[in-house]
Each structure stands twice: as structure tokens, then as C-alpha cells.
């Protein structure tokens, strides 16, 4: 597989920002929808606005790929809406004879691109990215047929992930419902369960060492694993070997 500079095969076109005084909230002849990042990221709470359809506006179609350029959504890949788009987004322009759209979409969502863009957004002197930033990125460019094959596999994987997320969400609802069936609402306490202070249900409550209580010399190679919030994954504790402390610094029994 060969790699090429990203900007050699894909240009980006920034949006336009008409004055707010020209925006209206209802459709009207001669006007076009004005797209903002929130229109893509908050589809359940639409606040649709329109601006006069001028030739100077930068526009996109439903299937076009846009990239969020600023703020908390920097690097977010946006698609599925048509209209004029504002300066917080940039549209990808490429030759579909060289690049498969879904292949490009998945690459833009990959860690290679997302980590790079996050780095651009973290600079103190600049809130977003520009063409010069992207010109340093290397884009993997297999033959078009291979791009289509890869995109098809990744599309299928994306569908499976979406189904898994939906299943987990339904499982959470089921577990919560089962808890309420067994014990009732813990706040309203309709079953009249006795309430005790946590201190009455345990011999002691202890916390581990942290912050100013730990010094460089307290970290050792073969000590007790130090558990941080990062080691709690989906309600389970998975201590790593990255940090260990001496026995004397442990306030809780092993």
C-alpha cells in the first residue's frame, strides 16, 4: 500500500458565516438551510435556521463529508444533511475516481486522523486547524477496489457496534427495572426498608494514599498495585502494573 500526502488527494473547503441579522427561523423561497455543528450532533433537538441563498455561500449535499474545525467538536466527522454550512466546518473535496467515500469516512474517524486533529486543537495560539496542518498527514491509498472492500468490512463492523450499544442500553434498562421490582425506588422507599448510616454497616471506611500523601520515593517496582479511577472499567477494577506503592503507604488491607 502506498501513502500520499493527504492534501494531494483531498482538499478541504471552509464554510461561510452570513451576519446573524440575515438568518430566519422558517423556510422561505430564495432561502437555504444554514447548517451548524449542532445540527449534526443534536438531531433530536433541531433548531433549524435559514439564510438567503447567495452564490457566495459554501454548500453541501447529504452525502458530503464535513469536518468540525473548532471547539469541543474539533475533528468530528459530519454527514447526512444538505444546505449551506458555516465556518466551524470544512467540506472534503476529492476525486471519487481515486477515493471511495466510505473509505475516506472511516479513515477520518480513525485514531491516525483524530489524534492528529486533537493535537492541532490543543495549541494555545490556535483553536482549530487549517490546510497547512493537514498537509503533513499521510493518507493510505490502496487501489479503489481495495478501498471499497475495506470500507464494506468497516461498515459491517460499525453496524455490529451500533447493535451492541443498543443491546447494552436495553440491558441497563432491564437491570434497573429488575432492581426496582425487587427493592423499590431507593429514594421513595415504598417497601419501608430500614435505613442505616453507612458507618453502622461497616467496621471502618478507609481511603487510599493520594495527592500530597505520595512522594517519588513511595513508588516502587514490586509493591502493592495502586488503583486509580482509570483502573475502574465498566464497574470492575482492573489494576495495572504502571504504578505500585510500598506496603507502608497502604491504608487498606490487601
Image: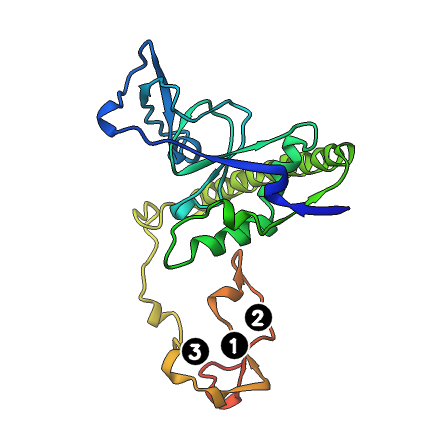
Q: What is the CA distance from the residue labelled 1 to the residue labelled 2?
A: 7 Å
Earlier sequence position, callout 1 versus callout 2: 1
Helix, strand or loop at mark 2: loop
Give x and y (percent) for residue 247: 52, 88
Residue 114: x and y in percent read 54, 49
Residue 186's disc number = none
Residue 55 versus residue 8 in the image, above or below: above
Q: Which residue is mark 3?
A: 208
Q: Is residue 214 left or right of residue 246?
A: left
Specify the quadrant that holds the C terminus.
bottom right
> Which dot, 3 or 1, sits closer to the camera?
1
Residue 243 or residue 62, whichever sits in front: 62
Q: Residue at x 54, y 47 (%)?
A: 134
Q: Which sits in the foreground, 210 or 30? A: 30
The residue positioned farthest toward the top in the image shown: 29
**How many circles with numbers are drawn on the protein?**
3
Q: CA distance from mark 3 to mark 2?
A: 14 Å
In the rendered image of this protein, does residue 212 appear above or below residue 113?
A: below
Residue topped by disc 2: 239
**Residue designated by label 1:** 226
SS at badge 1: loop
* Residue nearest the viewer, comparing 180 with 29: 29
Query: Where on the picture, by quarter, is residue 190?
Result: top left
Q: Residue at x 43, y 53 (%)?
A: 121
Measured from the top left, where is residue 106 in percent x and y?
A: 62, 39
Element on which disc 3 rests: loop
Amino acid at each position: 500500500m502506498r501513502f500520499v500526502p493527504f492534501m494531494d488527494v483531498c482538499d478541504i473547503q471552509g464554510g461561510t458565516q452570513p451576519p446573524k441579522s440575515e438568518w430566519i427561523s422558517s423556510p422561505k423561497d430564495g432561502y437555504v438551510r444554514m447548517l451548524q455543528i449542532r445540527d449534526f450532533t443534536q438531531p433530536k433537538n433541531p433548531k433549524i435556521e435559514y439564510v438567503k441563498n447567495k452564490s457566495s455561500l459554501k454548500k453541501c449535499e447529504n452525502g458530503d463529508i464535513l469536518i468540525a474545525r473548532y471547539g469541543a467538536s474539533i475533528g468530528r466527522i459530519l454527514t447526512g444533511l444538505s444546505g449551506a454550512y458555516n465556518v466551524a466546518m470544512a467540506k472534503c473535496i476529492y476525486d471519487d475516481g481515486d477515493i471511495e467515500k466510505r473509505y475516506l469516512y472511516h479513515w477520518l474517524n480513525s485514531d491516525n486522523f483524530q489524534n492528529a486533529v486533537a493535537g492541532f486543537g490543543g495549541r494555545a495560539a490556535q483553536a482549530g486547524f487549517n490546510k497547512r496542518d493537514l498537509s503533513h498527514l499521510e493518507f493510505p491509498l490502496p487501489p479503489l477496489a481495495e478501498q471499497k472492500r475495506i470500507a464494506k468490512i468497516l461498515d459491517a463492523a460499525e453496524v455490529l457496534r451500533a447493535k451492541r450499544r443498543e443491546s447494552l442500553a436495553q440491558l441497563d434498562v432491564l437491570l434497573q427495572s429488575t432492581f426496582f421490582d425487587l427493592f423499590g425506588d431507593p429514594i421513595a422507599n415504598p417497601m419501608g426498608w430500614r435505613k442505616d448510616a453507612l458507618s453502622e454497616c461497616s467496621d471502618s471506611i478507609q481511603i487510599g494514599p493520594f495527592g500530597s500523601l505520595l512522594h517519588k520515593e513511595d513508588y516502587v517496582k514490586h509493591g502493592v498495585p495502586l488503583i486509580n479511577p482509570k483502573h475502574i472499567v465498566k464497574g470492575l477494577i482492573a489494576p495495572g502494573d504502571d504504578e505500585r506503592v510500598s506496603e507502608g503507604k497502604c491504608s487498606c488491607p490487601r
